[in-house]
Image (cartoon, rainbow, N blue to C red):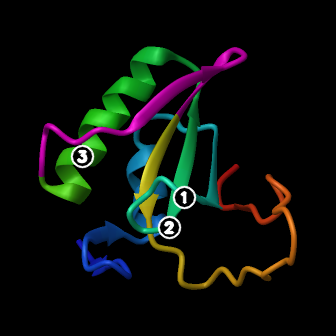
Amino acid sequence: MFVRSSFVGCPAPVAAEVVSVAQSFGVGVAAIRPSGRSFSGWVCVCSFGSEAAALRFAAAVGVELFGAADTYFAVRSVGRRWRVSVPCLSPAVVVRVWRGRPRLGRFRLVVGG
């Protein structure tokens, strides 16, 4: 397991590691996006077809990538899909800084299919 430190010194996995774990739980799509709530500044959002798969993934990724069974990841339903947001690092993504109000949903990189 390769874990880097975020800009605040907290460990966070690289997004590819999150996707690797998610694939064993039947992830549909995984996308990386900036997050103001994540300690790393980025989240990898993994989409699943069932709540059970999303909850199993959330439990497994906490143990496998963060070393703790009591970690919290946002799990929410969006239409017929369930999404899990996992803090990650994405050093390869370059984000332009815009003046004025940021436009949500602009800088997403899809990493799965």
Alpha carbon distance from label 3 to label 1: 20 Å
Label whose residue precedes the other's in the sequence (2 or 1)? 1
Circle 2/circle 1 CB separation < 8 Å: yes
Q: Is residue 108 magenta?
A: no
| Horizontal side of residue 40 vs 83, given as left or right | left
Label 2, residues with CA under 10 Å away: few <14, some 14-19, many ≥20: some
Circle 3/circle 1 CB separation < 8 Å: no
Does residue 30 sit above or below 26 in this rendering? below
Residue at 37 percent across and 39 percent down: it is 73
Label 1, residues with CA under 10 Å away: few <14, some 14-19, many ≥20: few
Nearer to us of marks 2 and 3 is 2
Secondary structure of the residue carrying tag 1 is: loop
Q: Which residue is mark 1?
A: 36
Q: Which residue is mark 2?
A: 41
- Residue type, mark 1 in image: Gly
Residue at 46 percent across and 29 percent down: it is 75
Q: Which mark is residue 21?
A: none
Secondary structure of the residue carrying tag 3 is: helix
As drawn, which residue projects farthest toward the front?
A: 100
Looking at the rendering, the stretch of residues picked out in magenta corresponds to 68-83
User: Residue 60 sits in which quadrant?
Assistant: top left
- Could you tell me which quadrant the N terminus lies in? bottom left
The reply to whether residue 33 is in sight is yes
Q: Nearer the viewer, residue 63 or 106?
A: 106
Alpha carbon distance from label 2 to label 3: 18 Å
- Residue type, mark 3 in image: Gly
Q: Is residue 73 magenta?
A: yes
Q: Which residue is mark 3?
A: 62
